Amino acid sequence: MTCRDTENLLELERKGEIPPGEQQALTRHLAACRRCGETAKVARLSSVLLGTLRQEIVPGPSFYARLRERLAAAGSAQPDSTLLHAWGFARRLIPAVALGVLVLAGVTISLEGPSMPRQVQGAHSREIYAFSLEEVNLTGSVERPNQDQMLAFVLMQGQARGAGSGE
Amino acid sequence: MNDNDKEKGLEPAREQRDEAAQEEARLIRQAQDGNQRAFEALVRLHERLVFGIIGSFLRRRQDVEDLAQEVFLKAYLAIGRFRSGAPFAPWLHRIAVNTCYDHLRGIRRRPEIGIADLAESEADFLDRYVKKGYLSGGGEADDRLAARDLAERILATLPPKDRLAITLREVNGFEIAQIAGSLGCSRAAAKVRLFRARRAMQAALRRLIRQDEHDE
Ligand SMILES: [Zn+2]
């Protein structure tokens, strides 16, 4: 065995996964090689020290009573819970409302018909629907998005807004 | 055992896991609607790991409980923003780790330590370790205390996030992805912090061991 094997074997030893034959070879090498001997001493002491930080503490008898009091105090300091619920409900409605607006916009465009000749067609028109709602309203010159495209748009907006929340 | 039998053997465990996940999701929804009992049930499900994380930075039971109260209170106030369907444990761990981070940031970082900075019990422990190796087994409570003092003294020289990385890995058994999630950094950044912390700890120990041997 060589000095280069030492670190790997010490790591296996730390995890308790070192094969017995290798353990003997490691012990022989550490006794003969001063540098690896020191490396082993440091690595083993490091695990011993870190091991002492592990402690099993369970909540004491008054922990939950105290927590309940604090939660109750925090709850009453928060905005009115009915208002919070109303806001939570309203938030869930936002995507549906947005979809409704899009559908209305689409219907309006299709009823009025395109005011200018179609300049953007095919795959490009889909990209415009996918990325910019304004394009639809401003030019009125592109194909009306189908329901799936509108849904995809709403979902994308939702994802963009939702990214980062929920941690 | 053939694959079919194995599959059957796994069924009950999977069902139990699914049931537990459904129960947790139900508690989260109720807690989001302001139900404190449901929130307390969630706390009880996760208290062990939260106490374990905090206990690796603080020693006294009262201090651990105080910080745990902070963690659960923050979680309670933030649960309305928790995205339903997301895993709850990592979210709670992140709050716990952030709270520990705030605590560690409040402690002045110590400079590099030498053997002259050690308490007598720590120096004794180190000397015995260097000469004979650490004797684990019964009747070593004093050694354990001295070792913990020494561990904390060395870790107090690290930047707080590096200290969090090595403690979460070596004491709490977190994987790199979990450390990254808890610290809010990339996996690569978590690896760098862990590497740096291990290297700093080993450098400090190497220095102390050499000083101890030199003083003979
Ligand atoms: Zn060697």
Image: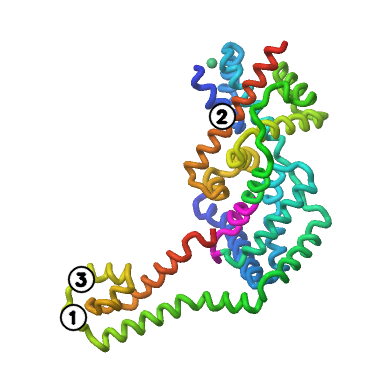
Q: Do the residues labelled 1 and 2 touch (CB within 8 Å)?
A: no
SS class of the residue under badge 3?
helix
Colour scheme used in the picture? rainbow
At 59% across and 59% down in the image, what residue appears?
B88
Q: In this view, does A53 lie above or below A119?
A: above
At 72% across and 66% down in the image, what residue appears?
A74
Have a look at marks 1 and 2 and say if they share a chain: no
**Tag 2, which chain?**
B
SS class of the residue under badge 1?
loop
Q: Give the range drawn in magenta.
A: B83-96
Measuring from the top left, give residue B6's x and y in whole percent: 54, 52
Q: Which of marks 1 and 2 is in front?
A: 1
Q: Nearer the viewer, mark 1 or mark 3?
A: 1
Have a look at marks 2 and 3 and say if they share a chain: no
- Point out which mark residue B69 bears: none
Measuring from the top left, give residue B105's x and y in whole percent: 64, 44
Q: Does the residue labelled 1 lie within 8 Å of ligand 1?
A: no
Instruction: Check if residue B89 falls in the magenta segment.
Output: yes
Q: Is residue B51 above or below residue B135?
A: below
Name the residue beneath numbered marker 3.
A122
- Distance between the alpha carbons at the discs numbered 1 and 2: 69 Å
At 22% across and 68% down in the image, what residue appears?
A123
- Mark 1: which amino acid? Met
Name the residue beneath numbered marker 1.
A116
Which quadrant, please, contains the C terminus of chain A? bottom right
- Mark 2: which amino acid? Arg
Which residue is at the front of the view, B213 or A17?
B213
**Tag 3, which chain?**
A
